[in-house]
Amino acid sequence: MHESPFVIETTELVKRFGLRTVLDRVTLQVPHGQVIGLLGLNGSGKSTLIKCLLGLLRPDAGRAALLGADSWQLAAREKSLIGYVPQEATLYHWLTVRQTVAYVSSFYPSWDRAWGEELVRRWDLPLSHRVGPLSVGQKQKLALVLALGHRPEGLILDEPVASLDPVARRWFLETVLETVADGVGTVLFSTHITSDLERIASHVALLRDGRLELHDEIDALKDRIKRLRITAPTDLPRDLRLPGTLRSVVRGSQAIVTLDGVSEPLIAGIRERFSSDVVVDDLNLEEIFLELHDAESAAAAVGR
Amino acid sequence: MASLRRLMLVLLAMLARPWIWFVLAFWVLWPVLSLVSHLMTPLVTRTPVAIVSGPTVPPNGGADVREDRLATITDWHALWARVFVAVPGGGSRLVEADRDRSERLGDWDILDRLPALERLWMTAPDVLSGEGWRRIGDRARLELLSLQNVGTCYAVGDDGFTSDGRDALARLTRLQYLELRGTGPDAGVLLPPLPALEACGIGWRHLEENLTVLAAGSPRLHALALETFPEFQFTPGMLAALRQMPALRTVYVAAAVRPDDEPAMARQVAEVGRVVPQVRVRPGSYSAKRVQAVGAATLALAGISWVFWFQAATLLATPLAWMLPRRFPPHAVWPTAVALASGAAFFILCQSFGVAWLPALGLALLACGVGLYGPVFDDTPGWPTRLTRLTIAADYAGGLLIGGIFIGAAATADRWLMGYEPAAALVLVVVAAASLSWKIARVARLPRILAEGGREAVVMWRVAGGQAGAWAPAARAGHADRRWWRPDGVIDRQLARPLPTAASAAAAFADMLRRPQSRLQILLLVGFMLVASGVVTALPGILPGGDTASWPPTKGWAAIVAVQFAWQAAAISLSSTAGLWWQRRSSLALDFLRPVSRRDYWLGLRGAVARDLILPMAVMAAGLVAVASWWGQGRPLPWLVSALGFASVIAIAHAMLLVIATSRRPLIAATTAIFVLLVAASGLFVTVLESISYGWHDAPPFPWWRPIAGAIVLPAVGLAIRAAVLSRLEDREIA
C-alpha cells in the first residue's frame, strides 16, 4: 500500500500548450475512498488535468501524483492499482471483445476474472464480436470493463458515460458505487451529467479556464449556495449589495439572488433591511454549476 | 505461465489484424521473391569494374543510322552479332550481320562513315581482326575506346593482334580512356606511348612491358585496371612501374571470375597496396548478383521488421496501453524476436554470399530500424524531438546513400560488402545501433508523444489540402488537430453551401503546401526524390569504379535523370494525393449533408479526385514524352504504347483514389489500391521499355507483339477496373 494519504494529488500544477496556459496552478488533493466529480466547461482543462495525472503529459510546473508516486514516473505497481476510462475509448478494432478482455487482463496480476465476466454479462457485451463494428456506447462499456476488471484502488473516468444509454449508465453508476462501497475505491469522475455526480460523488471540483475554482463536499456546497426570492413592498435597489452574490436579478419590488454563504442571520438581515419576504430555494448541482458560470459571465460582461 | 500467456496474447493481438497480412503479402513478398530468385541462380561470375564510362547511345546508333547522320555522330556503340564465322579448312572470315536491312552497310565500313567519332564501344564477340584494328586506328579523333570482351579473329598462335593493336593505338594520340580487358587469354596488345591517357584497363599478357610504357609515356594516367588470374604473381618490374606513375590514384586488380577466387584477389590487392600505399588499390571485379541479393534481403528484412514494429507501436500508442502495467516488454519481445530471427537469417545469408560480418551487421541494424521513423515521428518542442529527427535524418541519409550505391554503383557496394571499407561499415554499425536504440526507447513513450502532439493514434502518413482540403467543411490552413473537421459553427455555415472545389489544381496543391505537416512530408519526399535521383545517377560518375559509369554527362545521361525525376515526382505527387484523400474519408459523411443529391455528390467527389490527379498525371505525361522522344527512335510505337498505357494509369489511379477515399476498411483498401497502382505503373513502364527496345533492335528477342499486347491489355484492364469501381460507388453507404 502507498504511504500518501492522497490517492490523487496535484500541487500548483501548470500545463501550457504553446502560449496557452491550459492548467494554471491547480492544487487538488483527493484522499482515499473519496468520489470526486470534476466539472467544467468544454476546454476548461479537465482532460489535460487527467492526462497530467496519468503521466501522459508532462507538467510545465508543479507536480501531479497518483497513489503518492510522481505521475511522470508511474511504475507498474501504481499502474496496476489504477483504472482509466478515456473520453473516447481507443480500442483495437480488429480484436474481438473476448480477445480484448483477455489481452488487457493478462497485464494485471490482480484481474478478477469472475468480476470481469460479471461486468461483460451485466453490460451485455457480445464476446465474439469484433470491436471495430461495435457502437460507441458498446465500446465505452468495454472500456469500463477493462478499467474495472482488476478492481482498481483509484479510478479515473474522463466523461465515461456520455455515450451510454440510460440503463447502462445506471449499471455503471451502481458499479462505481460497489467499487466505493468496498472501502478501497477512490474515483475521479469527469462528466457533464451532474445528476450522475450527485448520485455517487461526495465531492466536486470545478475547473474554469484552467484554474481550480472550487473544491468542496457536494452537501456543503448545496448548504452554502442557495437561491433567495425576495419580495418587497416597494421597488428594490438595482444593486442589493449582498455578500457572496453569485447572480442577482432585480425587477421592481422582486429580486432573485444566488448567494454563496447563506445563513440564518443573513436572511434575517435581508428581511429587516428591505422589509421583505425571503424564500430560500435549495439548488441541485446542475443549478449550482449554471449559477457559478452565470456569475462568471455577468462579471465578464461588467468587465467589458 | 502468466507471462507466457501474456506474450501469446500480445502476439495474437498483432497477428489478428488482417492488415498485417496484407502488408506482409504486398510489401515483404516482393523482396523475398526477388531474393529467392537470386538464390536460385548461383553467384557464378564476377563483372570487371568499369574504369571508362559505359555506352550512352543505343547499339548500332539506331535512328542515327536510318537518318544517315553518321558523319556527325560522336558516339558509336557497335553490337555486331555473329559476324565472324569459321572457314572450312581452318581460319575464319568476317560476314555481314543479319541486321535490319537498312543497316546492311558493311561492318567495318561503318567506321569509315564516322569521321567525327570520339567514343567507340564494341561489345560483340569475335570481331576484332587486322582490318578492324586498321579502321579503328583511322579514327584519329577517338578519345574513348572500349574493346572489353571483344574476341579476336586471329588464329591460335597468330601474334598479329599484338602488333596490329600497337600500330592502331599509336595513331590515336587523343585517346584518354582505353579498355582492353577481356579480349581473351591469347590476346594482348603491346601498348604504345599514349600521352593523353587517363584511364586504362589491360590484361595480364605483356603486363610488365605495358606498365613500363604507361609509366613512361602516360603522365596523366590516374586509373588503371589490371586483369589477372588467381595464380598470377606480380614481378618486381611490374611493381616498380606502378610506383613510377606520377598521377596514379586508383588501381583495380582483378583476379576473380568465380567467387572461389576472391581470396586470391584479396591477396593481390594487398600485395599491390603495400607497394603503392598512396594509391587506392581495389578489387577489379565485383559480383552484381551478390549486391542484388543482399539488397533484396535487406529490403525484406526492413519490411518484416517494420511490419512488426508498426504493429507493436499501434498497440502501444493508446492511452489504454499506457496505463497497462509492464506493457512495453511483452510488446517489444515480438518485433525484437522477429528482427533478431530475420536478422540472423540475413546474417547467415550474407555470410554464405561472402559478405563480411561488419557490413552485414550494419545493414541488419539499419534495416531493423529504418521503418520505425513513422511511429516515433515527433513534432513537439524539446531535445528528444530534435534527437529523434536527427536519427530519422541519419537513417534517411544512410538508406539513400546505401540504396543509391547498391543501385548505381554496384562495384563500390560489392567492395564494401566484401569488407574492404571497414571504417565505413563501422560507422554504419554505430549510427544504426544508436538510431535503433533511441527509436525503440521512443516507442516505449509513444502515448506521451502522441498526447503532447495532440494526436491519438500512430499513422503512416499525414498530409492535408488539395481538392480534399477544399472539400473539408472547415479548412483552416495550418491547423494541427486531426479533428479539425468536426462539427462546430463554422461547419454549420459551410454545410449550407454546395460542395466546394479549389479554383485549380495549382491552388489545391498550394493549399497542401500551406499546411505545415503536409509541407514537411512533401519536402521529405521531394528531398528523397532529389537526393535519390542525384545519388543513383551521379554516383557512378563521382565514385571511381562505378560499374554503370556514364561520365561525363551526355544527352543519354540527361534523359535518364529527367525521366527519373518525372517518374518519382509523379509517384510522390500521386502518393500525397492518395494520402490526403485517405485521411479525408472519415469526414465525407458531413459533405453528404450539404444541399446536393446523391448523384451530384458522387459526381462532385469524382471531379475533385480527378482534379487532384491533374498534377501527378501531368508530370507523368512529361516523363513519358521525354522517354518516347529521346529513346523512341522516332518511331510511332513508343508514342502509341505510352498514350494507351497512360490512359490506363489515369483510369486506375482515379478509381483507386476513390476506393481509398470511400472505403470502410481504409488500411486494407489503401494497401490494395497502392499495390494495384504500382502494378499499373510498372506495367506501363515495362511496356514502354518493350516498345523502345523493339525500336532499337527490330529483331528478336524483342518481338513486336509484346508492346502491342501491352498497349491493348493495359487500357482494357484500367478501364475495366475503373468501370467496376464506379458502378459500385454511387450506391454505396457513406460512413
Image (cartoon, coloured by chain):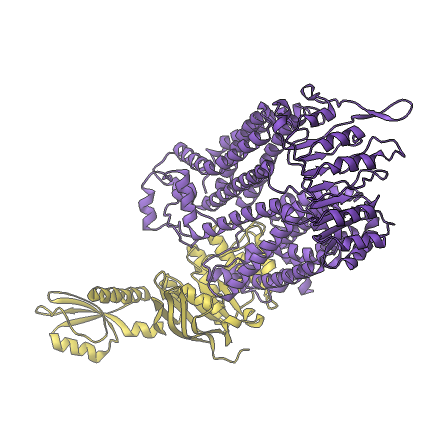
Quadrant assignment, res B593: top left
Find residue B384 and report its horizontal and vertical position in percent.
52, 65
- Evaluate whether residue A220 shows in this view: yes
Instruction: Return the residue nearer the eye: B146 or B586.
Output: B146
Residue at figure coordinates x 81%, y 33% from the top left: B152
Q: Residue B722 at what x, y percent from top left?
A: 52, 31
Q: Which of A204 and B338 is in front in this view?
A: B338
Please tell me in which quadrant of the rendered image residue B75 appears: top right
Quadrant of the rendering where the N terminus of chain B is positioned: bottom right
Residue drawn at x 64%, y 60% is: B432
How many labels sit on residues? 0
- Lateral position of residue A190 relative to residue B706, left or right: left
Q: Colour of chain A?
A: yellow
The x and y percentages for residue B540 are 65, 46
- In the rendered view, would you say B184 is above or below B321? above
Which one is nearer the viewer's eye here, B458 or B692? B692
- What residue lies at 80% left-to-right and 34% top-to-bottom? B164
Residue at image location 51% in from the left, 34% down from the top = B622
What is the drawing colour of chain B?
A: purple
Compared with B52, A276 (above or below) is below
Q: Nearer the viewer, residue B605 or A100?
A: B605
Residue A147, visible in the rendered structure: no
Is B510 left or right of B40, judged from the image as shown? Answer: left
